[in-house]
Image (spheres, helix red, strand yellow):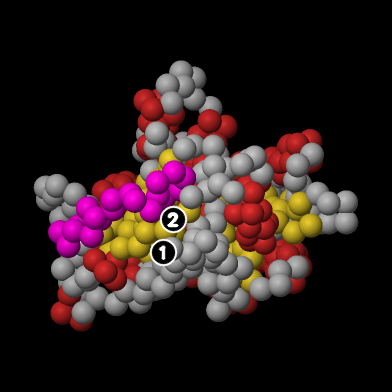
């Protein structure tokens, strides 16, 4: 049975700059966990990756299972002298509580752990203020954080890229996360930067979450290669309706997120008919350059037009377990699913492995770069603009160096992104 609740992740990429899904072209990934959200999800991701890779059997041969384990370890873990795998990760937060809890949980498991000197924390948070995380904590702690990342990079035989886990609603994950991503782009321009961002609840977690979100998205658009998006509302619905959890906790939500991410990042065969695992976790060249005549005009287009499906730029289906080589994925090759200036042969890929994921007999994951986030993005931009027009809470940002012009730049850029996706 395919677990439907792991079936879809969404990508927003800088495709109109010719960058879309050129992800992790070599071996090891350094994960950067930022803020409370990033560190809690990061732990769950590494726990899923380790536990899945060490599942006995995996519905495949012993030799194939050993190759799967070795490939997973090469990507996400290094080994210490005592034989306990160490996560290739840097943990960053401006308060010590969550990092201490994360380190303890990993150590108590006895199966894997974080590096002894892979953490950076302070005693003063960012107060849910993007400007404080970006303009104060970022410059103040840049050298210490980047040194930790460099040490982790030096442990890799070959660096494929960075996986940055962060939220958009708060101050540290969003503001400091945007600052760190920008510096990774400056220092490691040839390595891939992929940000996994948590889209806030529509009903609101933080009163200024829409400000924090537009500032985060606009800055990441300039410095990240792809954004892997999870909406809290969508994951909450999975927990309630598909998993029948009555009292949903953030731990429940984080475990669903980790399951979905693991189902994408774990090894798959390098090509059809091969039984060798690809060295790259998401190594596919999906550079997309729309024809000049296809570029949308400046200004926001309507996002309320009725459509029967979300037009896509790229789709990746990942199949794991029994009968994967006979699975019919022909429906994903329908030209009607894709923008008119892109052939399905260039927009759709399928990866397979007979090795089961987490003991599921069959499982599937879909990573899609499509119009699915247009409405949520338009909603966040609209709410932020309404606050900005009334000058609500702007003083909390201007006192830390984020001026009204910075907000206007963010609005302009995100309106163009919305228009570009609407024009697909």
In the rendered image, residue 327 lying in the magenta stretch gets the answer yes
Question: Residue 103: x, y in percent?
Answer: 76, 43
* Nearer to us in this view, 366 or 235: 366
* Nearer to us in this view, 294 or 159: 159
Q: Is residue 290 left or right of residue 318?
A: left
Question: Residue 69: x, y in percent?
Answer: 65, 53
Position of 21 relative to 186 (above/below)? above
Q: Secondary structure at mark 2?
A: strand
Query: Is the C-beta separation of discs 1 and 2 under 8 Å?
Result: yes
* Chain-order first, disc 1 or disc 2: 1
In the rendered image, residue 99 lying in the magenta stretch gets the answer no
Q: Which residue is rendered at x = 58% and y = 72% of the image? A: 26
Q: Which residue is rendered at x = 34% and y = 55% of the image? A: 368
Position of 329 relative to 22 (above/below)? above
Q: Which residue is mark 2?
A: 352
Question: Residue 132: x, y in percent?
Answer: 59, 55
């Amino acid at each position: 049975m395919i677990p439907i609740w792991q079936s879809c992740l969404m990508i927003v990429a800088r495709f109109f700059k010719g960058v879309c899904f050129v992800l992790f072209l070599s071996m090891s990934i350094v994960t950067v966990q930022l803020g409370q959200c990033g560190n809690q999800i990061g732990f769950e991701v590494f726990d899923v990756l380790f536990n899945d890779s060490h599942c006995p059997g995996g519905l495949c041969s012993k030799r194939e299972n050993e190759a799967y384990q070795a490939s997973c370890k090469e990507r996400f873990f290094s080994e210490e002298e005592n034989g306990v795998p160490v996560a290739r990760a840097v943990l960053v937060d401006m308060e010590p509580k969550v990092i201490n809890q994360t380190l303890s949980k990993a150590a108590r498991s006895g199966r894997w752990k974080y590096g002894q000197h892979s953490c950076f924390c302070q005693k003063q948070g960012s107060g849910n203020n993007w400007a404080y995380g970006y303009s104060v904590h970022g410059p103040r702690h840049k050298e210490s954080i980047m040194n930790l990342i460099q040490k982790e990079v030096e442990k890799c035989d070959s660096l494929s890229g960075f996986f940055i886990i962060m939220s958009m609603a708060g101050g540290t994950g969003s503001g400091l996360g945007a600052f760190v991503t920008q510096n990774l782009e400056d220092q490691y321009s040839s390595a891939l930067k992929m940000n996994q961002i948590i889209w806030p609840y529509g009903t609101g977690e933080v009163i200024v979450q829409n400000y924090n979100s537009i500032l985060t998205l606009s800055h990441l658009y300039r410095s990240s290669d792809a954004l892997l998006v999870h909406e809290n509302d969508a994951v909450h619905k999975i927990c309630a309706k598909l998993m029948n959890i009555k009292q949903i906790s953030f731990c429940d939500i984080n475990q669903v997120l980790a399951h979905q991410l693991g189902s994408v990042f774990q090894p798959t065969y390098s090509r059809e008919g091969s039984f060798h695992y690809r060295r790259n976790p998401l190594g596919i060249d999906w550079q997309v350059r729309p024809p000049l005549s296809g570029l949308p005009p400046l200004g926001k287009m309507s996002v309320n037009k009725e459509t029967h499906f979300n037009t896509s730029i790229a789709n990746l289906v990942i199949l794991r377990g029994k009968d994967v080589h006979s699975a019919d994925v022909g429906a994903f090759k329908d030209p009607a699913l894709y923008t008119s200036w892109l052939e399905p042969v260039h927009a759709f890929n399928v990866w397979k492995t007979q090795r089961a994921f987490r003991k599921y007999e069959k499982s599937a994951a879909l990573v899609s770069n499509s119009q699915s986030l247009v409405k949520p993005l338009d909603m966040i931009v609209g709410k932020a603009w309404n606050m900005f027009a009334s000058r609500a809470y702007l003083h909390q940002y201007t006192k830390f160096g984020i001026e009204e012009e910075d907000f206007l730049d963010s609005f302009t850029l995100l309106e163009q992104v919305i228009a570009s996706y609407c024009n697909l």
